[in-house]
Image (spheres, helix red, strand yellow):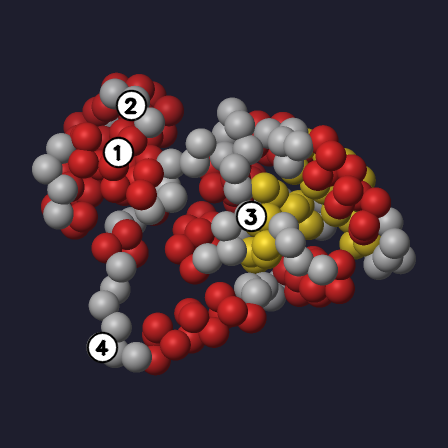
Amino acid sequence: MIKVAIADDHALVREGMRRMLSASDAVEVIGEASNGVEAVTLVKEMEPDVILLDITMPVKDGIEATSEIVGLGKKTKILILSMHADEQYALRTLRAGANGFISKGARLDELLKAITEVKNGNRYLPDKIAQSFAERHIQPDVETPLVELLSKRESQVMRYLARGMTNREIADLLKISVKTVDTHRAHVLKKLQLRNNSDITRFAIQNGYVLF
């Protein structure tokens, strides 16, 4: 039986998902979390086989929680849940270390398939997103989105700058020097063809990097 944890800031969503999964003999829900910080703690303490992780949680969003969970070195696989079933959201979660991505509107059979796939060490993406990925990578004339030019660390710095954090605050959070943060900021501006922090904030909001 696959041990599953659910992390979502809406109690009704967690309850509904728990009830839905209880209809299957293949999984057992062993824990719940209402935000990203609780999700990381839950993985530390309970080590579920798979955690279903909402992308838009408070305190720490799903992308940040994913990065921290991956850093724990646990066996837990991460399946991201999102209302935004599009390629860019999926790409960002996979780059953060998630093992799969699925829409909150998925049917039980698809959710169970996704849970099983990531538990077995495979990637899982809805058919529509997987097809979009494949088409883009086999068409050499398709222009690479600007956001894909950023490294993982540059993406982190961009998100924090967009939230109004200072270079010092970002440096303390990421445990790097202020100079390093400034270097990453310069790379973000250059790669995204932006001029200042206001442009970074606008770009991040328009492309879903800052979730409210």
Mark 4 residue crowding within 10 angstroms, few (<14) / some (14–19) / many (20+): few
Give amino acid for label 3. Ser
Q: Are the residues flagged by discs 3 and 2 in contact, CB closer than 8 Å?
A: no
**Percent position of residue 106, x then y:** 66, 58
In the image, 81 versus 212, the foreground residue is: 212
Q: Are the residues flagged by discs 1 and 2 in contact, CB closer than 8 Å?
A: yes
Q: Residue at x 29, y 23 (%)?
A: 164
Label 1 sits on a secondary structure element that is helix
Residue that label 2 marks: 164
Residue that label 3 marks: 82
Q: Distance between the residues labelled 1 and 2?
A: 8 Å
Label 3 sits on a secondary structure element that is strand
Q: Which residue is drawn at 44% across and 52% down?
A: 89
Q: Earlier in the sequence, mark 4 or mark 2?
A: 4
Q: How many marks?
A: 4
Give amino acid for label 4. Asp
Q: Earlier in the sequence, mark 3 or mark 4?
A: 3
Label 4 sits on a secondary structure element that is loop
